[in-house]
Amino acid sequence: MIKDEKFVYLPENLFAVIETSCGDRFLLDKVNFDFYKLDENIQIAKHDCSFLFWCESQNIMEEAKELKKSALFSLRKKMVKNNEILRLALNLSQICTLRCKYCYANVGTYGNPGFMSKDVLTRTLDFFLSNYKIHNVHVFGGEPLLNIEMIEKLFEILKQKHQELRITIATSLFVSEKIVEHLVKICKFYEKDFQTYVVISLDGPREIHNYTRPSSNNMGSFEQIIRNVESFRQNNIPISFEVTYTGLHKKFGLDVLKIYRYFYEKFNTMNITIAPVYDWSNSLDRELKTNVSMASEYYKALVFLLKRIRSSEKLNDFEKIFLDSLLRNYINPSNLSGNLVISTFCPAGSNSFIVDILGNIYPCQLVVGDSKYKISNVVEHNEERILKDIKNWRSSALKQFVRAKHKKCRDCYFTYYCNRCVFKREYEKDMFKTCDVERKILETIIEVDPWSLSSTLEK
């Protein structure tokens, strides 16, 4: 920010001015994601590669200070540092109890079935915890609960090293009740030491889930998973659900709003992530394929509910909670990075890594087992070599996937907000496909101001 007595110059790469259809104006700090509503007293004009900010009635710096105090909302984001890893995933198991029809991981084996040993786990944690600040350890697989002993060992090692971080356990939960009871005991024992979250893959109602995620003997998995979910709920262990949206959902008439309603009514939760199915191996069943845009689905749900409010219709309890969650979470997504900003479309390979059962380090679970994406190995190489390998890979990832190299991103006021999967075949082709609707969602939310709706949603 450059200033003089009359003006403040705001660089265009760091700031943006948004004008809504209602004529309201907002100043956006792109990096910190702070929004400021501008009154008529404040003037802003484009000047070369900056915005010229001035005020006729007051000292400009005093006005800027007052504006800062009255931010519409402020997320206080900051750029992630080189020594920070947002997500360290550990493939504790490369064996799975399910045969999901859209699996990208060769039925959970990644081409090399087995379990991570204590030696590989210890070497992995020793290296990463000694050299980086880890925000989230992600227990992954296969079905990681099949290696419950290593999950317990993971908690033990992290406590010994006095690590304060988040532990996320991704599971199908299609395991024995005995294993679930063991995990519940682990979570309860360490509940004061770590933020632990269990993310359960469940595709919705029985008839959909049993088709998309059958067991290894082609039987349904739904009933056993539901029984196991209750164990976590009864013990107040935080859980969330991950849904893979397919053509079958569309066939059954389940849009985003109805999926959320299903989980709200069955589990009393809105902690749900919905991702569209992707045909990783060009072998997906025809009835599962869909070209649905989740951004478009969320936009339709948002417009539908806001239209009802504007026409003075009363929302039911579910609709109020859904709208409140959508407004707040779209502005401040509860994702890996939290309030940290990354310069790439995805942190994979720059601030996120996964280690397989043999100690191989990869940028993402989608490419585990593919030798061209192997970064290093915690067992075969010494610390100096691993650090060098990661540094080289990071440099390559930043050059290849950084947003700033694309003019559309540089010109967009939500430069540091969105994300894209950089390992999809159509990555370069599809990366801007949903930009317009994502901007529409955020502009709509800014225009209505989620905080001004709070009184409406509380009635």
Image (tube, grey):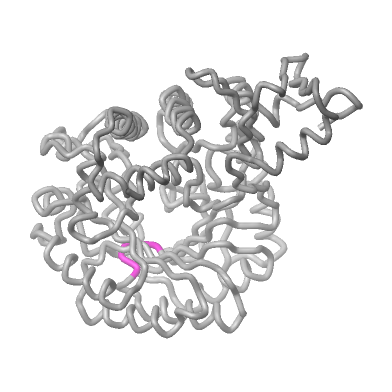
- Would residue 141 be counted in the magenta stretch? yes
Spot occupied by residue 284 in the image (x, y as percentages of width and height): 21, 38
Residue at image point 32% right, 52% down: 272
Spot occupied by residue 59 in the image (x, y as percentages of width and height): 85, 29
Q: Total marks drawn?
A: 0
Can you say which quadrant of the picture contains the N terminus? top right
- Which residues, given as a range, are shown in magenta? 140-144
Which quadrant of the structure image shows residue 267?
bottom left
Q: Is residue 372 above or below residue 45?
A: below
Magenta residues: mostly which secondary structure? loop
Compare residues 89 and 367 and report the one nearer the observer. 89
Q: In this view, does 221 lie above or below 251?
A: below
Residue with the most extreme right position: 5
Compare residues 431 and 98 and report the one nearer the observer. 431
Q: Is residue 135 left or right of residue 228?
A: right
Spot occupied by residue 333 in the image (x, y as percentages of width and height): 48, 47
Spot occupied by residue 374 in the image (x, y as percentages of width and height): 52, 51
Q: Is residue 78 left or right of residue 444?
A: right
Residue at image point 28% right, 40% down: 277
Q: Is residue 87 above or below residue 78?
A: below
Q: Is residue 57 left or right of residue 331?
A: right
Compare residues 17 and 77 and report the one nearer the observer. 17
Residue at image point 25% right, 42% down: 315
Compare residues 88 and 61 and report the one nearer the observer. 61
Q: Is residue 382 visible?
A: yes
Q: Is residue 293 visible?
A: no
- Would residue 160 be counted in the magenta stretch? no
Q: Is residue 152 above or below residue 109?
A: below
